[in-house]
Image (tube, helix red, strand yellow):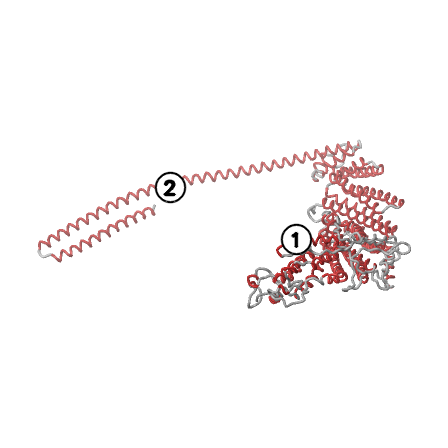
Amino acid sequence: MPASNNNAKNNIYHESQRIRDISDDQLSKNLAKYSLVLEKLTTQSQVSKLVNVIAQDHKNTTESLNSYIEESQLKYNRELRKYELNRVDLTTTLSDFQSTLSRITSSNNSAKMIYSDINTTDQEYKYLNKTLTFLNDVRTLKNNIILINSALEDSNYVTAAKSISEIRKLPPHIIVSEFAKSVVPSAELPTEPQELINDWCDKLTNIFRTQFEAAVENKDIEQLTIFFKLFPLIGQSQLGLDIYSKYICEIISAENKKIVEGAIKYNAGFNTVILQLFKTVSMVINEHSKIISTCYGAQYLTIIMEKIEKETELQAILVLNYFSETRKPAELIKQFNNQNEEEESEDEQDDYDDNEDSDYDSDTDIPKEKKKQIIPLNELDNLINEYSQILQNWSMYTRLFSVKWVEFSKNKSLDDPLSLPDPIVNGNFLSKLHKEHHIANFQLLLFRFLNDSFSKIITLEEMPSLNEFITLDVVNHKDQSSWPISSVLEDMTLLIRKSLIYSLNTGNFTIFANFLDKLIVFVQNEFLVKFAQAKFKLLQAKLPVQSSTSFIALRRYIPKLGTDGTDSKLGSRNGTPAAERREYSPQNASKLSQLSKFDFRNAFANIQSNLQSVVISEDSSDSSSLLALHHFLIYINTLFFAKFSLKLLLTTEILEKNPRLLQDNFPFNNDALLITEKIEKCQGTMLTQITKLSTWSIKVLFEKVLSSRLRLLFTDLFVNDNKSVDYKRGDEEDSNDSKCYISNIESFEDLSNMNEFVNKWTTLVQPFRNVLHDDAFDKLLKSVAIYCSKVVEKKIWSLQVNELGAIKLDRELSLFINTICGTNYSLRETFVRCSQIVLLLGFDDDDFNIQSGDIKDDISSSMDWVLKPQERINARNLMVDKRR
């Protein structure tokens, strides 16, 4: 209220102040007006009138001011009364609020009292429920004790065990409570409940154990299973598991004993014995895990598995001992080591050199026997197979055991990488494999088998005849088996495949990884160096030294028969059929009288038709050199097919056709991934070494056989055979003796030299194309193309060419390149320099820059030139009829 009064007073004050300000202004104006009038007064009457006017004005102003003050005072009083009424209303409201607050406080106190009563009631209800539960449990205890007593009297052990199990589920304090001690005992059973239950459990434990053992003795599986299920009901789970695991172990031991005795009696493989052992154990784990999980809980399965694993390893060690005593692998390896030491002391190394101590006979190329055979290869093969299957069966068992272990373990997930469980890692069998060097022994036996078998393969080598391939007709090879290769490769492929299977099936990471490393050494040393490279060098020495007058041609081989009718060179090998002979009648290419009538396609067709009449030339070469050439080609094919065979064995069969093979055999951790990487690395290393030797063999073949022949073929190609080199533009009538690239209309059509080259080229190359594998022939053709490009370029630089000669040179070079390269378009890049030189000869004079002598910039930028500017200038200077 005081605040409201102050606001009213302030409003009145401001209003009066405004009125006063306005009156002051008016008074100032009036005063100014009166001052002006006063200055103009001249008479007394005017002064009197002015005084009257001022007096009247003063009166009016005073009246207005009084009226305003009275009105403002009235308004102020009205507002003041209004605020007083509001204060009275507010006081009433405040009084009502205080009254309501008092009632709320009273209600809150009542609610607290009600809540306290409810809590008290709930607590009493819980006590009542607890008491009721206690009484029910005591009643259950009493009823079950009565039921157990009755069941024991009737020998109803199942009911008694179930009742004891129900009592054991009661809270422990029920049985020992004073109330139970007072109400449960009766006249018939005065003993306290806890003591009574303990006595019954002990009694039933002895009964169940006796009945279980009796069922085992009587082989009553039904009774055995029933009593096995009763042990956990009376709190004897551990005892039940112990006697059950003992029963299972006895089964495993008895079954294994029978199998071992049968194997010894009938001389069966111990791999079968250990396989049956692991099958029995796997069946036991799969079938009995359901009963154990249902009656005892899954947490007890690992305990049973650990006990079974100990018995399994004990029996497996027994089988392994029988294997070691019967097969004696350690003693066999000792004999191998002694033999190796003797050979090293005598400095007898298993190589295939053609020196004094060579493993090959200098005439027959047949390897000599070096090592005294300690054990026949077939017996060694059987031993390794048995060894491999023993390790394979162990690997499969460890995988099954590991999967089940993870399945029954709470702290492991099936999604995690599989790893060997502790019972396997710390087991005796795995320790025995390493301590007694079974892993190392298997590897040594396998490597020995690989080397000895390969030595035997070499002694049985058979070489196919090439006569059916040496023809001018195209031989279509329908499959890879139609190519001529050494039998050593086929036998070696089967040998490596068998060895891969032996090592891979073991499922042992160390064995297979080491085998891949040894396989690289075997292929590089035994196959490539001691066999293939030695063969190449031996055959290379038998090839004659090539010259322009002496060379060897690929012809059919007709063996010389000895007195006994056999091939004097091949011994027991069958002779090849007699060679077919054809007559060679060269045809001259048709000439056209006029340039406008020339048809290049018809000329090329004539050349192709001439190929049908080409025959094998009768080069002077003895049969030994010819046979060496045949064998050289066969070994080249053998190298190229060796790459296909290794890819088939490693990549195709293991990684592509059987993508789950490595994961199934190496399931632990990331072993499968590591093995995959090692296989790829192994294959890459071997293919690299084979490629090096095959490239070298192709180079030798080219240098020893083809280079001199090619040199003769090129003699009449791309040469200036003009008698006069003073040819001038416009002097065609004086140059009738020009026959080559300073050409006139008649000599322009002469392609006889090129036609003859095409015929001879086909005669030379087609037999090689039929014999060599496509990849080998492509490599050989690449060497030929490189050689030809250098020779042809050198010849072109020595030419002198006129305009018609340039056109003829372009045609002949195109035909030459087509003949050499055929459908292998990548080889055409070899002749780029030659093609660009001839291309420059066909340019007009206007295409060249007068100052530099080189081609103009727009032409230079229109294609990729391999010729340098000076070489392009030199190429243009080959023209003898350029205008400038």
Query: Can residue 865 be seen here?
Result: yes
Residue that numbered label 2 is attached to: 91
Given residues 282 and 390, the one toward you in this image is: 390
In the rendered structure, are the residues bearing label 2 and label 1 in contact, judged by CB atoms less than 8 Å apart?
no
Q: Position of residue 42 (x, y in %)?
A: 9, 57
Instruction: State which tag comes first along the sequence, 2 or 1.
Output: 2
Vertical arrangement, residue 146 with respect to residue 443, above or below: above
Vertical arrangement, residue 179 with respect to residue 435, above or below: above
Amino acid type at circle 1 is Arg
On residue 867, which mark appears?
Answer: none
Q: Position of residue 841 (x, y in %)?
A: 61, 62
Amino acid type at circle 2 is Thr
Given residues 427 and 760, the one toward you in this image is: 760
Q: Position of residue 505 (x, y in %)?
A: 78, 49
- Quadrant in which residue 630 is drawn: bottom right
- Determine whether the residue tagged by mark 1 lies in a helix, strand or loop: helix
Q: Is residue 747 left or right of residue 303?
A: left
Furthest residue to the right? 563
On residue 601, which mark appears?
Answer: 1
Cα gap from disc 2 to disc 1, whole angstroms: 129 Å
